[in-house]
Every structure is written in C-alpha cells, then in structure tokens.
Amino acid sequence: MTEPIILSTARLVLRPWQPGDIEAPFTWAQDERFWRFLPLPVPYTRDDALEFVESRVTADWSVAPAFAVTVGGAVAGDVNARVEREHRRAEIGYGLNPAHWGQGYALEAVEAVLGWLFETMGLEKVIARADAANRGSWRLMERAGMEREALHRSHRVLRGERRDEVVYGLLRRDWLRAKADAGIGRPAGRANTNERTSQRPAENRR
Ligand SMILES: CC(C)(COP(=O)(O)OP(=O)(O)OC[C@H]1O[C@@H](n2cnc3c(N)ncnc32)[C@H](O)[C@@H]1OP(=O)(O)O)[C@@H](O)C(=O)NCCC(=O)NCCS
C-alpha cells in the first residue's frame, strides 16, 4: 500500500488532490491550448471537472498516484502515474494550466515525480506518451532526460482524426547516472531549480 505523499520542490508543492479542487481543472480545460491533444470532452463541464477530481481523490496510490501541482498554494496542474508493479514500470501523464506555461514548472514537477517513482517506489522504468504533434509535451520529456523509443503511426483517434503517437522512456539507471552527474540531487534537465526535492506524508490521508 502506497500512502499519499507531498513533494516540495524549489517553487512548487505537489500534493494529493482534494475534493474541493474543482475550479482549477474546470478553468484550464476550457483553454483549447490545453485540450488540443487530449481526449477531453469539449465543451468541458463542471461535472467533467468533478469527475476528474473525484477519480484523482479516490485513486489507489499503489497503482495510480496523482499529484495536484500547486504554485503559491493554488492548483496549477496535474502529474499522475499508472504503475504496473509486475514490471516495476509506470506511465506518467501531466498537464499544466496554460497561464503557467513556459516557466519550467512542468519540468520541475515531472522531475520531482520521476525521482519519487524511481527512488521511493523503486521502479525501474518510466514511460510517457504524447500526440506526435504535441511538441510541448515531448520537449518536456526530453528535458527530463527521457528518450524517444517509438513513433506509433496512425495509432489512435482524436476527435475523429487518426493521430501519430510518440513514446518516451527513462530507465532508473540513466536517471541515477544523470543525477550523479548533476551532483546536486537532480537529473540533467534544464530547470534552474536545483534544490533537492523533499518528501513528506500527506496530512489529509483518506
Ligand atoms: C506539456 C506541458 C505541461 C508543458 O508545459 P511547459 O510550460 O511548456 O513546460 P515547462 O514548464 O517545462 O516549460 C518549458 C519551457 O519554459 C522555458 N523555461 C523558462 N524558465 C524555465 C526554467 N526555469 N526551467 C526550464 N524551462 C524554463 C523553457 O525554455 C521551455 O521552453 P522551450 O520548450 O521553448 O524550450 C504543457 O504544454 C501542457 O500542459 N499541455 C497540455 C496538456 C498536455 O498536452 N499534456 C501532455 C499530455 S501527453
């Protein structure tokens, strides 16, 4: 059983989602820049946001940990993982309110979760997928040290259109090597937020 945890980085606090966190995802999901490459309902309603938060709040952290990314106490994004224990592997997903893009927050949050997955959860591999045209997403994966492992052509349907998908992966040994090379408790990404990520159990355990 994995208990919900809070991760603190230089600029962010990543905490478990709470039932009252509806407004932030409702707001960011109205923005076409956010939903363009994601299979979200359009228009996105308050009930959709409620369902999203509910799924996060009730998730079993052993297989589906999910962090609300907060900036100055306000929810600004989501980083989640689907853990496959049998393979000691996880797939991560992430999204940030477009109002906060371009500041390295997403990278900072993803690196914190990668560190937790490798070092606390003891996983050997983390993958992520994105629409091949979602440059912001795969650039983020590359900055986090992930390597492109596949381009799946015409792989899925998004709003009636067949889309290509890229798959990125990062091995625990490469994560640890990059961290050792950086020498300061973080991998070799570009975010200038070099303080060690701290972890503490969430106070609001369900
Ligand atoms: C994917 C997503 C989270 C990336 O957000 P982002 O703001 O571009 O990512 P970052 O926070 O890491 O910011 C990186 C950019 O900020 C700039 N930046 C500014 N300060 C920075 C810092 N201190 N550290 C790192 N980058 C910094 C970088 O130059 C970089 O720009 P570049 O790509 O032109 O090099 C965002 O596009 C998103 O939420 N998309 C919608 C949801 C989605 O598609 N999710 C992925 C599903 S697969």
Image (spheres, helix red, strand yellow):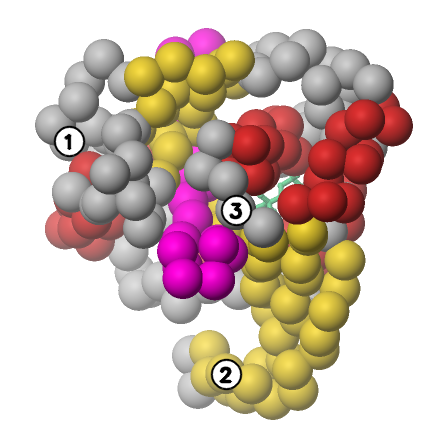
Where is mark 1, residue-wise? 19
> In the image, what residue type sits under mark 1?
Pro
Ranked by sequence position, the earlier of labels 1 and 3 is: 1
Tell me the SS state at disc 2: strand
- Determine the image quadrant of residue 3: top left
> In the image, what residue type sits under mark 3?
Leu
Ranked by sequence position, the earlier of labels 1 and 2 is: 1
Disc 3 packing (10 Å; few <14; some 14–19; many ≥20)? many
Number of the front mark, 3 or 2: 3
Towards the viewer: 148 or 34:
148
> In the image, what residue type sits under mark 2?
Arg
- Determine the image quadrant of residue 59: top left
Q: Which residues are magenta?
A: 70-91
**Residue 102 seen in the current view:** no
Ranked by sequence position, the earlier of labels 3 and 2 is: 3
Number of the front mark, 1 or 3: 3
